[in-house]
Amino acid sequence: MAHQLTSLGISVLALLRERPMHGYEMLQTLSDRQADRIVRVRPGSLYHTVERLTGQRLIRRAARGRDGNRPERVVYEITDAGVEALAERVRELVATPVNEYPQFTVALAEIDNLDPDSAVHALDSRVVALEAGVAEMTAQRNAGIAPGLSPIVLEYLLAITQAEVTWLRQCATSLRSGRWSWPATARPETVTDSGSEVQT
């Protein structure tokens, strides 16, 4: 059975499969590779992940090193169990769709809490932000300078972002034209207390 590795856990194991590293080097490498496009990277969460993986014996302390006058740092390396867990978890995640509960879907489900003009403005703002990301990723792809992002990941991010932009534009157009009717505000529920109606 696959270890329930977090996204950051997968990233840490993948880094250590390349070579042993200390915690700060992992952080710097993830930053240099723009890993924040695909995983949330924070110093505290990374060091917590390293400790958890060590406790699970998927990685181990390999050595202690010092760089100049800097404090001594623990260097970690992946274990055979870590290599196996990494491959198993990646295989599982690629093969099996799961509901990841994105926040944007929650917001869409409740978008009728905005007035139509505010909703359309919010959708337009999201389109502008996503288009900037598409332009940046396209430029990196065309110049061959997307650091650390494999071509398959970059193409996937571009494809899903472009698809979202297309859908958002259609959604905003439908709201503007009235093709999608805006739900009427729900009437307050009434409950009966001693035979009289009370609004809640």
Image: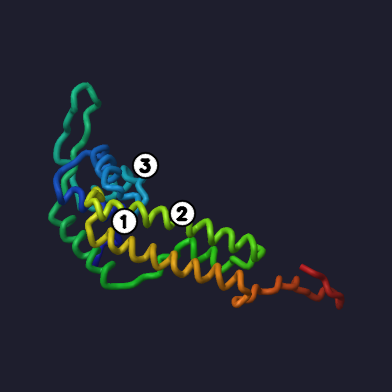
Q: Quadrant of residue 109?
A: bottom right
Q: CA–CA distance between discs 2 and 1?
A: 14 Å
What amino acid is at disc 3?
Gly
Query: Is residue 83 in view?
Result: yes
Contact? badges 3 and 2 (CB < 8 Å): no
What amino acid is at disc 2?
Ala
Give the numbered dot on residue 44.
Answer: 3
- Along the polypeptide, which appears first: circle 2 or circle 1? 2
Contact? badges 3 and 1 (CB < 8 Å): no
Contact? badges 2 and 1 (CB < 8 Å): no
The residue shown at (16%, 31%) is: 65
Query: Is residue 12 in view?
Result: no
Mark 2 falls on what kind of element? helix
Between 12 and 142, the residue placed more toward the observer is 142
Give the numbered dot on residue 129.
Answer: 2
Mark 1 surroundings within 10 Å by alpha-carbon count, few (fewer than 14), some (14 through 19), many (20 or more): some
Mark 1 falls on what kind of element? helix
Image position of 109 with respect to 25: above or below:
below
Give the numbered dot on residue 138.
Answer: 1
User: Of the residues tagged 3 and 2, which is closer to the observer?
Assistant: 2
Residue 171 locus on image (x, y percent)? 53, 70
Image position of 107 with respect to 59: above or below:
below
